[in-house]
Amino acid sequence: MSKIADLVAGLFKPVADVIEHIVPSGDKKLELQSAIFQAQMGMADKMMDYELALLDGQKSIIMAEASGKGVLQRNWRPITMLTFLALVVCDSFGWLPNPLASEAWTLLQIGLGGYVAGRSLEKVAPAITNAVAEAKKGK
C-alpha cells in the first residue's frame, strides 16, 4: 500500500513544490495545499480501488483453476514449474546439448514469480479484500 502512496505523492510533488515556493504564506497557500492533499487522497483511493479489482480478478482466475474439474486445469502451473526446474538442473550440470538462453532464464523468473505470487495471492486475497472493504466502510 505504501507504494501507492509513494507513487501518488510523487505525482503531486511538483505541484506542491510550486505552491510552496510561489504562493505567499497565508490562507490562500493553506487552501491550495489542502486542495492538493484532497486530490492526492482521492487519487490514492481510486488506485486502491483499482488494485482491489485487480486482486479480485486474479483471485477468481486462480480459484477457478484450483477448483476445475480437469486434472490439467488444476495442475498446469505446478507441471510447468517442475518442467522448468528439470531444465535448470539439466542446464546446471551441462546435460543439455545447448545451454538455456537468457530469455529462458527470464521466462523462468517470471513464471516462478507468477507461480509464487499466485499461490500467495490465493491464500492472502480474501484477507486483503476484507480489510479494504472494512476500511471503506469506516470512511
Image (tube, rainbow, N blue to C red):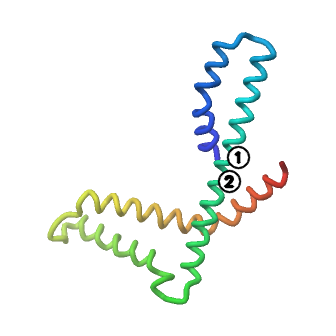
Q: Position of residue 16 (x, y in %)?
A: 65, 24
Residue 1 tag number: none
The residue type indicated by label 1 comes to Asp
Which residue is more in the foreground, 101 or 73?
73
Q: Residue at x 68, y 53 (%)?
A: 49
Mark 1 and mark 2: span between their CA atoms?
6 Å
Q: Residue at x 69, y 13 (%)?
A: 23
Which residue is more in the foreground, 14 or 121?
14
Q: Position of residue 58 (x, y in %)?
A: 57, 66
**To which quarter of the image does residue 67 belong?**
bottom right
For label 1, the SS is helix
Above or below — where is 133 with respect to 6?
below
Q: Residue at x 75, y 11 (%)?
A: 25
Above or below — where is 61 with respect to 6?
below
Q: Bin the neighbour count of mark 2 within 10 Å (Cα to Cα): few under 14, some 14-19, many 20 and up.
A: some
**Count of numbered badges drawn on the protein:** 2
Residue 45 tag number: 1
Q: Position of residue 87 (x, y in %)?
A: 28, 71
Q: Residue furthest right?
A: 138
Which residue corresponds to mark 2? 49
Cβ–Cβ under 8 Å for marks 1 and 2? yes
**To which quarter of the image does residue 99 belong?**
bottom left
Q: Bin the neighbour count of mark 1 within 10 Å (Cα to Cα): few under 14, some 14-19, many 20 and up.
A: some
Q: Residue furthest left?
A: 97
The residue type indicated by label 2 comes to Asp
